[in-house]
Image (tube, rainbow, N blue to C red):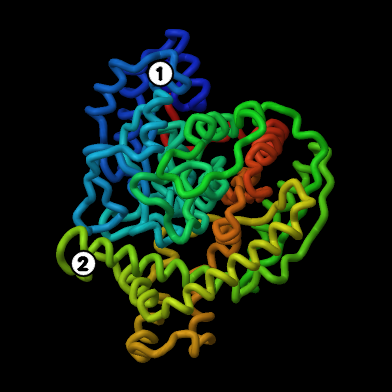
Amino acid sequence: MSVERALWEHDATGLAGLVRSGEISPQELVDAAIARAEATRPDINAIAEPLYEAARTRAKTIDRNLPLAGVPFALKDLGIAMKGVPTYGGSRIPAFVADFDSVMTERHLAAGLVPIATSTSPEHGLRLMTESTAFGITRNPWNTAHTSGGSSGGAAALVAAGVVPVAHASDGGGSIRVPSACTGLVGLKTSRGRVPLSPLVTESWHGMVVGHAVSRSVRDSALLLDLTHGPDPLSPYAAPLPKGTFAAAAVRDPGKLKLAVYRKSPLGLPISAETLAALDTATALARQGGHTIEEIDLPYIDRDFIADFARTVAAAVAGTMRGEVLRVGRSISGDIERATRVMSRFGEILSAGEIYASLQRLHATSRRLIAETAHFDAVLMPIIAHPPLACGAMDPKGAEAFLEEMLDRLRLARLLKFKPLFGQLMDKSLWFTHWPAIQNVSGQPSIALPVYVTDAGLPLGIQAAGRPGDEETLLALAAQMEKISGWLTRRAPLQMPV
């Protein structure tokens, strides 16, 4: 088998095994990944910064006995640092170049991974489609007229296109799970505090952002989590320790689980027939695995909950933009996109008291959610309300022009007096996805499962959300569903190697 074909067919665990046995050298594997990155780059546009020469140099000295020795990898262009590598955050703001590695990067490198590039993101991760003025449109390898999702859309596109078998990703409102749902991948949003974000930040978006990966296989996600989880001295808090290893969880029989299905929209917006079919497919797979299923409602996960989430994110964006002004030492209003500028203005209008009250309401609802679903091993629910959208379909001009006009009228007036207008804005901006923010608020783990492909040939994944700190049950369930469904053999029809 050629190295190129091996890169296409094997997951990260399999490739590391070939390196360890001497069948493939790290240099050959990295060269093959770079060649595929360049071959697919015009089609998917998923690379922010190539790291080719550094990758080739690292591959020459890699210890073949490391768990993921020589496996090509990509770092997201947001939320993680690697010494000497520019981080743009999907923006035209001058890049941040760190003189340190994030703890997560240190752990990636210690595992033997070889970063060959940074992957594209929408500006500051604020959209669930990876399209930016700075880098253009990132496209879905399954159909390049459609989105790969966001904000880890570049990471998902690189994995789905067979450039790398696994890639770093982060999730503050669905940014691991939405791209996974769009590209037919496994995407684990970890428990809050499972993987440190330090020393780049202590926490992000009030603790709602987590880091991990998108991958082809459940076992890759589990192994990488074993190699990256755990606090460091700068971590403000940590998720509970697992009972065993995550890799062991991914190969064990999950037993007979008690699962719930939640199929309503928290915003009361339309859900496509394809999304409901994907959820039914996941339910059928779970029943095949011997698990019991109960339909549930979560009436308190509603428009007010999503509105509070949106307010707290806006406040975080406003604070981030203030930090960027201090970093570059000048105004950045001409560098950032309209969406970011308007979101920041929205955050500036909200008072500190309003943000604190929103956070307290979110925490109270999270406590209720966790308590009332604790007797379930996992809750199945959608990720995206519609199949992957056409590129440009969520052009921000409509929603942002609407908000900008409203802000111009309000000046420094209190936005909460205009709840009907705010509701219209949410409907415009969150029409594509209604659910992922739930677990970012609650801190629960949730895993995207690539259970379905539409008649048009587009992936449409769903998610299983678990108890706080219980990734092990999710990984066991996901691995069982992977085995029953055979989804691991699916590949995007983009320039398949011969």
Give the answer, above or below, for where 145 lies relative to 478: below
User: Circle 2: is it few (<14), some (14-19), or many (20+) Cα within 10 Å?
Assistant: some
Which mark is drawn over residue 153?
Answer: none
Q: Quadrant of residue 304?
A: bottom right
Q: Quadrant of residue 323?
A: bottom left
- For mark 2, what is the residue? 332
Q: In the drawing, does residue 197 fall left or right of residue 265? A: left
Left or right: 168 with respect to 271?
left
Residue 151 horizontal/vertical position (percent): 43, 54
Label located before the other in sequence (2 or 1): 1
Report if residue 53 is visible in the image.
Answer: yes
Q: Nearer the viewer, residue 44 or 474?
A: 474
Q: Residue furthest top?
A: 22
Q: Is residue 281 left or right of residue 313?
A: right
Mark-to-mark CA distance, 2 and 1:
45 Å
The residue wearing badge 1 is 3
